[in-house]
Amino acid sequence: MKNILVESTTDIKRSLGPDFQLMRDHDPLPRERSATKKYREELLAKYPQECPCCDMQCGRSKLDAAHIWPLEIGARTTKDNLILLCKICHKMYDSGYASHDDMLKCYRGWQKGDKYILVNVMNNNKKQSEKIQQTLRPDILDDVINNSQDVYNDVQSGKYRKALRKIAYIMDVVDQEKIALFKIVTAQINRRRAARGVLTKAQDILDRVDIKHLGKERLSLYYYEKGYIYQLSGNAYEASRSFMRSAQQAAEIKDSYSKLEECIGKAQYLATQVIMAKRGAETHRDISRKMDKIIDRLAGLDGAFAGRWVKNCMHWKYNSAIKAGLKDEAYSLESDIQEFTNSLTINTGYTKGFTWGYRGLSKVFFGEKGEAKEGLGMISRALVTNLAGNRRRPEGIRDLMLGFESGYLRLYGKKGKHVITNISDVRKSILDGSSYLDPYTSKAFSIKA
């Protein structure tokens, strides 16, 4: 009898059954949220009822206790990590219009009674972000649909079906080149979705693309999407070939965005090498040296995507260090990632909640028992977030589940072994070739339809 391969979050949760509640039980977020309410009352009693970010006078009901370092990346609810903000400034900060470092300056001024008005910085970053979004890969969707910003926003907010409907609406009135481009964009949206059969569907769409109708500047995107779908489907070798082909195509185009595409293709190629690599220090150091060269090139490019890909490259180095069993290097890279993240805004590569799960892995695998408990909480937070109603495909989910199993065993010993048996079985059945420690590799499975 064939094993059943699952790929949707609904099927993963259904397969986990009561074990999903076990993950919820170890998620520290509800406890930390509860502590926020307690500390908010103490802060309201101590500080003036005004927002230190915009200097607006507020009533008690209009002031939130905001976390400087988000709970989603493993931070705790403490007085030193809370600041009173009006609801508008809180929302803007959570959206990435100010960096953690910026908010820390505001917090320090607030404690001393000085003013560091941050709202002007956030408003400027918001305006800049809107301009950036209008010019990012300016003709990728503009060629396909007039209101491309709406489609971009739908994709970024996980409204994938809505985005697909908007694109499909104008398919009958576009020429062959735009049809070919439409297919690539449609494949991209499908492979992002957390639903059954979407990778097969995305691959079928790309197989029907006639690249003769694509301009040279589109070929890099085409091979990148092929590579991504190969990787998610568990074929890291073919993924690496497609990513390198993407980089080569981008290198032939002499514009600023193609320089970024070339770096992205090469970085993704190295990421597949991490997936395929055996556990060894020498392999890690070779990949790490090559990744550093790409980081140096990305650092010379402007824009949010360049910063985001610097962060991605740092994560892949971190994943490689964990895979190689290099404790000190993993901890050092974790610190570097956090320092880099603290300086980011939405315009330089900020992505909300990207790091918390993988940060937990180093604590589970290398930390003392206290750290392992903290790591298990961070991993549980990531698992619950990824599986509880998330429309986006939960990439790296096999690694997170492996980390949960390892952390649970470390905390509860042999008596916890029977508890995680089902979690282990579910993990092994998940179609997730994007994990680094425990990637799915293509074998004789039947995909749940």
Image: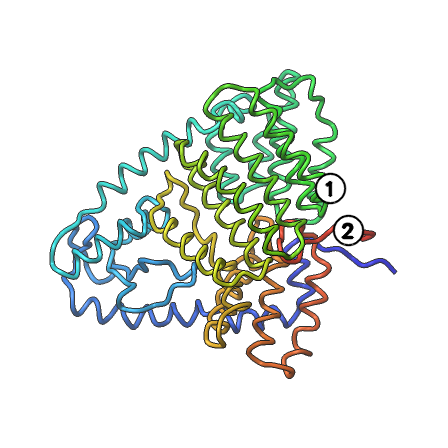
- Mark 1–mark 2 Cα distance, whole angstroms, equals 9 Å
Q: Nearer the viewer, residue 21 or 422?
A: 422
Q: Considering the numbered disc 2 on the image, is that residue within a helix, a strand or a loop? A: strand
**Where, by quadrant of the figure, is residue 420 drawn?**
bottom right
Q: Quadrant of the N terminus?
A: bottom right
Pointer 2 residue: 447
Label drawn at residue 200: 1
Residue 108 in the image: x percent, y percent? 19, 58
Of residue 145 and residue 217, the one placed in the foreground of this image is 217
Residue 173 showing in the rendered view: no
Kind of residue indicated by mark 2: Ile
Between 278 and 345, the residue placed more toward the observer is 278
Q: Position of residue 133 (x, y in %)?
A: 42, 32
Does 17 appear above or below 389? below
Crowding around mark 2 (Cα neighbors within 10 Å: few <14, some 14 to 19, many 20+) is some
- The reply to whether the C-beta atoms of the residues labelled 1 and 2 are less than 8 Å apart is yes
Residue sticking out furthest to the left: 113
Q: Quadrant of residue 2?
A: bottom right
Q: Give me the residue at 66% from left, 23% from top.
A: 180
